[in-house]
Image (cartoon, rainbow, N blue to C red):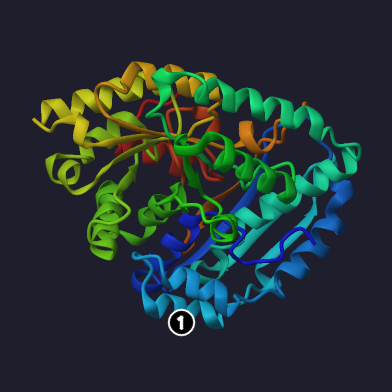
């Protein structure tokens, strides 16, 4: 089967899940699937996807996995005890061909946030691997290895990049589980100190690699419903996060409402409280310049902060960003699809996004308008008004 461990997911799912357990255990949510590639036919694979989900829902955390999580300094003992009892439930997931009859599929995850939050990453990995198994049965791993080695050489053989740090963020859109594991081993062995770690907890545990991750958009989106008022939802999310982790996991996600809204909320208090921020949409060079300028305007030395880039990165782009910013701030680069699904085939651009929390619409208004996903246009317009965001 494609997923054989509940650790086969991104670290930020566990860090967010711990916050949900401690602060929002009663929240009810809904997630929806979207494939951004035009004309991709996934409907023929519905039964295969359902079969994999059935297997996923039989899995439990092993004692060795629980002990590994317990050893992470920011994971609390009661959360690990909860995971020891945890099991995914099929009743929260529906998969069916699109009613439009266009070959697309609908995946809806609906239920308690605490019991549905772990579905997203394995579901996307399942859809990806089934799709490529069916459409590319003769996988070109030789070409994949050639491309991977070329990327490693770009960094490892350039002495000016000795301080550059690259991480794997590619679980959800990987070609296959086996290929992601091979990529990570190659990065660990051949990239050396330039390899920072992986977002995949299972592979981090298995291969002695640092697991990486903090928060995702769903956390700040849910705060639109869970906070005291909508305008304060972003600051509410940051406050709750800081209370939970007390200085750990201090990277703020910056693009839930776009750069302007983030900078309005990310004031001197949060700039000092958090270690840095992560870029995930819009122009990365503009974002980096503006964030450095924001720190400087508040008389904070940007060299004490970390900027993480993770939006559609490839190695050449990461190198350009490193050259522009490395003398002025700390940097890290999370590369996903371009590492774990670059074998010469067109990768799927698939997402599962939260669209409702406690019956209320929630949305992301990033600096890349095509990433916005909301089923309520009136709410989207209201959100733009509240956060003073111009419609694109």
The answer, for residue 362, to whether it is visible in the render is no
Q: Residue at x 62, y 59 (%)?
A: 8
Let me know if residue 77 appears in the view.
Answer: yes
Measured as percent of width and height from the top left, residue 230 is found at 30, 50
Q: Is residue 23 above or below residue 153?
A: below
Identify which residue is drawn at 46% across, 20% down.
Answer: 319
The x and y percentages for residue 339 are: 62, 34
Query: In the orientation shown, which residue stands out farthest toward the left?
Result: 299
Q: Residue at x 22, y 40 (%)?
A: 265
The quadrant the N terminus occupies is bottom right
Left or right placement of residue 210 versus residue 298 in this view? right
User: Crowding at label 1, few (<14), some or many (≥20) Cα neighbours within 10 Å?
Assistant: few
Which image quarter: residue 257? top left
Q: Nearer the viewer, residue 122 or 76?
A: 76
Q: Quadrant of residue 49?
A: bottom right
Task: Give the total number of marks visible in the rendering.
Answer: 1
Percent x, y of residue 384: 37, 35
Task: Please give the residue where the numbered disc 1 appears in the rendered image.
Answer: 81
Q: Could you tell whether 244 is left or right of 159 in the image?
A: left
Q: Residue at image x 45%, y 30%? A: 281
Q: Nearer the viewer, residue 262 or 200?
A: 200
Residue 111: where, in percent of width, then height?
Answer: 57, 69
């Amino acid at each position: 089967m494609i997923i054989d461990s509940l650790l086969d997911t991104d670290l930020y799912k566990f860090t967010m899940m711990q916050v949900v357990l401690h602060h929002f255990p009663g929240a009810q949510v809904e997630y929806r699937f979207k494939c951004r590639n035009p004309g991709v036919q996934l409907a023929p694979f519905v039964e295969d996807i359902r079969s994999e989900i059935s297997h996923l829902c039989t899995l439990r955390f092993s004692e060795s996995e629980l002990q590994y999580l317990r050893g992470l300094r920011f994971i609390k003992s009661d959360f690990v005890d909860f995971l020891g009892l945890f099991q995914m439930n099929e009743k929260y997931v529906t998969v069916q061909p699109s009613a439009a009859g266009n070959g697309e599929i609908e995946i809806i995850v609906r239920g308690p946030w605490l019991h549905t939050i772990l579905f997203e990453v394995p579901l996307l990995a399942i859809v990806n691997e089934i799709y490529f198994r069916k459409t590319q049965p003769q996988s070109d791993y030789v070409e994949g290895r050639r491309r991977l080695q070329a990327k490693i050489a770009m960094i490892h053989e350039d002495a000016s990049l000795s301080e550059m740090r690259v991480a794997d963020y590619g679980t959800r859109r990987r070609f296959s589980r086996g290929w992601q594991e091979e990529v990570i081993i190659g990065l660990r062995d051949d990239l050396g100190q330039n390899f920072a770690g992986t977002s995949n907890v299972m592979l981090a545990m298995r291969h002695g690699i640092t697991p990486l991750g903090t928060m995702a958009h769903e956390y700040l989106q849910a705060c639109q419903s869970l906070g005291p008022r909508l305008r304060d939802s972003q600051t509410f999310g940051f406050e709750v996060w800081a209370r939970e982790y007390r200085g750990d996991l201090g990277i703020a996600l910056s693009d839930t409402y776009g750069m302007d809204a983030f900078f309005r909320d990310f004031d001197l208090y949060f700039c000092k409280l958090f270690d840095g921020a992560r870029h995930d949409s819009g122009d990365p060079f503009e974002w980096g310049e503006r964030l450095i300028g924001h720190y400087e305007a508040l008389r904070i030395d940007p060299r004490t902060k970390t900027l993480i880039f993770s939006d559609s990165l490839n190695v050449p782009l990461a190198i350009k960003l490193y050259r522009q910013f490395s003398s002025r701030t700390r940097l890290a680069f999370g590369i996903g699809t371009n590492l774990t699904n670059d074998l010469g085939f067109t990768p799927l651009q698939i997402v599962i996004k939260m669209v409702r929390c406690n019956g209320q619409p929630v949305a992301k208004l990033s600096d890349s308008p095509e990433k916005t996903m909301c089923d309520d246009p009136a709410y989207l317009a209201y959100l733009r008004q509240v956060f003073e965001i111009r419609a694109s």
